[in-house]
Image (cartoon, helix red, strand yellow):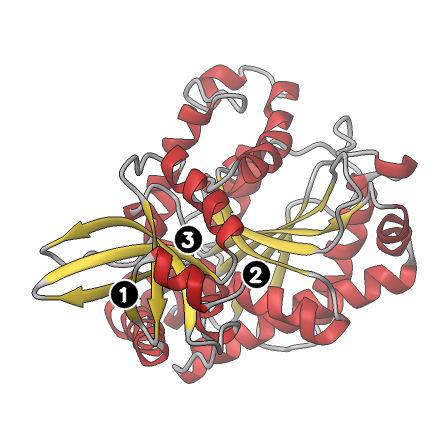
Amino acid sequence: MKNLIKLVINLTVFCLIFLNTNLLFSQESKSKFTVVLDAGHGGKDPGNRGNGYYEKNIALSIALKVGAELEKQSNIKVIYTRKKDVFVNLFKRAEIANKVKADLFISIHCDAHTSNAYGAGTFVLGLHANQRNFEIAKKENSVIFKEENYEQKYDGFDPNSPESVISLVLMQEDYLDQSIVIADLIQKAFVSDLNRKNRTVKQAGFIVLKYTYMPSVLVETGFLTNKKEGAYLNSKKGQKEISKSISNGILRYRNSIISGVINNDSQLFSDLDENYTDDYFLKIQIASSSKKVPLKSYNFKGLINLSYTKNSNVYRYYYEKTQNYEQAKDILKTAINAGFKDALIVGFKNDKNITIEEYLSSYKN
């Protein structure tokens, strides 16, 4: 499986470098790698107010610091969707990036939750795999209610409707692979540089990412609603460290593109193998087919952490991986709710199928 994952990543890079002629033309015709930094919210839209902080101010400060780091590189051009406390509608943010034919779009935010949740996470555009991801997207998308004529501007999009999110995915599909790679590099920089809790790369329907024609990522730098993390995000030290990690991820992505080699297995795939050394584990079988289907979330109703096996010309597709049977039952519910009504829990030993009874009798959860 590990070799298969690396093959998928290498093929992605190959296609990115040699087959995506539009991207090649863009980079050959410009002297600099262009990054658009989008500080979320602003002006009449304060963002979340966890612990009395202003998301709009923290996002702007971090975006400006990321830009300052990137601008130290003579071959990188940085453009901001805003450099002060002003309101910029979501469509305009994407328009700024498209107009300059940016190579990368990064939208910076701070998260909020009713619990004491903490940690940094990165998002690419896609169908949410759970209610939590939908709630995050709904919160960020609700800014359109502050815009005039938003119904016409966004083709009747309703942030509160899960069905509306489905229409978002198609326009960014061509850039999804690259978006996943850069999101994972930023995520891993948070973990390796700052030892932040890894909330991993996820997909959700962020409308600010819909209209961009380049790899695009939304970064949730942490939770203002967490007292300790909110204070960290609001501090000069925290903002400096976070901006450094984001810029590190961006630089690693750019250098990988230039060199033609991405030495990175995306978080969306690598978790399947790196965290499990035991012979016994469980997966959720969600589909089977006589044809091989690419392990892309848009082919599997927005689910991520996918894998497959092949036996007698039949491909069986699986979602997630765990050694905990109770957790497997929760994952099964997620798969069923996503539309895979016939999904089931499957046991494995040394990558070979075993019955659930054999699994439970042989492996202690």
Residue 214, given in percent of the width and then of the height, sits at 43, 54
Density class for disc 2 (Cα within 10 Å; few <14, some 14-19, many ≥20) is many
Q: Nearer the viewer, mark 2 or mark 1?
A: 1
Counting residues from the start of the chain, the first of labels 3 and 2 encountered is 2
Counting residues from the start of the chain, the first of labels 2 and 1 encountered is 2
Nearer-the-camera pick, 299 or 183: 299
**Residue 269 appears anywhere in the view:** no
Screen quadrant of the C terminus: bottom right
Q: Amino acid at mark 3?
A: Ile
Counting residues from the start of the chain, the first of labels 1 and 3 encountered is 3
Screen quadrant of the N terminus: bottom left
Q: Disc 2 on helix, strand or loop?
A: strand
Most extreme residue toward the front is 361
Identify the disc placed on residue 304.
Answer: 3
**Residue 298 appears anywhere in the view:** yes
Residue at (91, 51) in percent of width and height:
231
Residue at (71, 36) in percent of width and height:
41
Identify the disc placed on residue 353.
Answer: 1
Callout 1–callout 3 Cβ contact below 8 Å: no
Nearer-the-camera pick, 286 or 133: 286
Q: CA distance from mark 3 to mark 2?
A: 27 Å
Would residue 182 be found to the left or right of residue 290 on screen? right
Would residue 308 be found to the left or right of residue 167 on screen? left
Q: In this figure, which residue is indicated by the disc labeled 2?
A: 35
Q: Disc 1 on helix, strand or loop?
A: strand
Residue 186, given in percent of the width and then of the height, sits at 61, 66
